[in-house]
Amino acid sequence: MKILIILICALTLTSCSVNTKQSTDIQDMILSGEKLPSIRHVTEMKITGDTLWFVYETEDGHGQRFLRRALIDCDNHQLIVSSEIGRRDNGYYTSYMPYPFIADNGTIRVVSQDDCEIYSIENDTTLVRTTQYLMEGNSIAPFPLSQYVQDLFTTGPNQYVFIGREPNGGRQYAMKADLTISKIDTIRQINRLSELQAWMSNIGELAYSNKHNRLAFAYKLHPIIEISDMNGNIIKSIRTGEDTFNPRTLEDADLESFNILHNIDVTYNPDYIYTLYWNCRYDEATTKAPTIYKIDWEGNVVKHYSNLPGPLYRIAEYDNKFIIGWNGNNFVCIPAP
């Protein structure tokens, strides 16, 4: 009888240990200020100071992207949303594909992803031309480039790094631009496997640290994050999962829907990279628990959250204390790992 009681107690303790798995405290953000429309996708999030800048597509926007800013109050779990940025009095927009980036003086600027024109922001909502283009007709470039640019960062006055693509499904590169001499050059080609040269199979997110002068690229279709120097040398390759990509899906119109997705989004500060890792297909994201990895710029995984309640689609690091996320319906506040 005594042995039976001991076994029952042991089983009870084991059951309690399993069921008390630690969960991460995620709080919904209360939205105030200007009303937001029904959002289909949030495509970009960045934070400067106490301001969140985010780009989104609406349910009935036909692919147009809209830019807003919101003041962050994480203590009270609140976002105070501004009106649309770049909307003119006649209802038209200065840019229909705005992409915000942090300028060398710490302010936010915007590049239009349809023609590479660069704008400053005045009075919080107005896009003003700087008369500069990231690339234009007289730019010196090593090969033809699409004008759709991604993940733009400033490395100094009139100096930029970004992801550039060859047109017509060509290759993808980390590139640098010097606007003072209108010259664009490559840093390194971004491709996981030599037999998969097209940019579609190598999509992902780029991050840059001005403190370490390094780049990090996280692949969406491959469980790999590569940290490189500004000469294109890979310093560290970090694996976050098992290889799953099926090259045969390159023939499909939407190859992302047929593959396991890995590193979905990246946020960063001068000391750390944070990657949002899924390890599931897009249609499974609402039922799977994502992970956030915290990685230093030497390529060491410092911490990770592997028990996040899903879904989670976008993240932005805030003041080394919190991560602001988008879960498909609302913004959320997550204590930084």
Image (tube, rainbow, N blue to C red):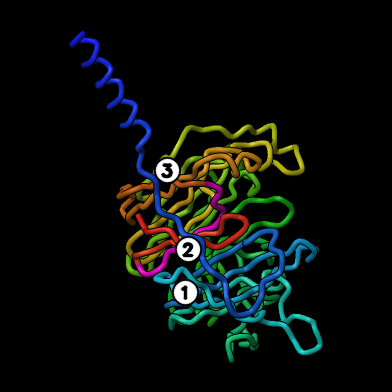
Q: Amino acid at mark 2?
A: Ile
**SS at badge 2:** strand
Q: Residue at x 65, y 81 (%)?
A: 83
Q: Position of residue 4 (x, y in %)?
A: 24, 11
The residue that label 3 is drawn on is 307
Nearer to me, 89 or 155: 89
**Mark 3 vs 1, N-terminal side:** 1
Q: From mark 1 to mark 2, how far is it between C-alphas?
A: 9 Å
**Mark 3 vs 2, N-terminal side:** 3
Q: Position of residue 199 (x, y in %)?
A: 63, 49
**SS at badge 1:** strand
Disc number at residue 117? none
Q: Amino acid at mark 3?
A: Asn
Name the image quarter holding residue 156: bottom left
Q: Residue at x 58, y 61 (%)?
A: 330
Q: Is residue 97 magenta?
A: no
Q: Position of residue 137 (x, y in %)?
A: 70, 75
In magenta, the rendered stretch is 310-319
Disc number at residue 72? 1
Name the image quarter holding residue 165: bottom right
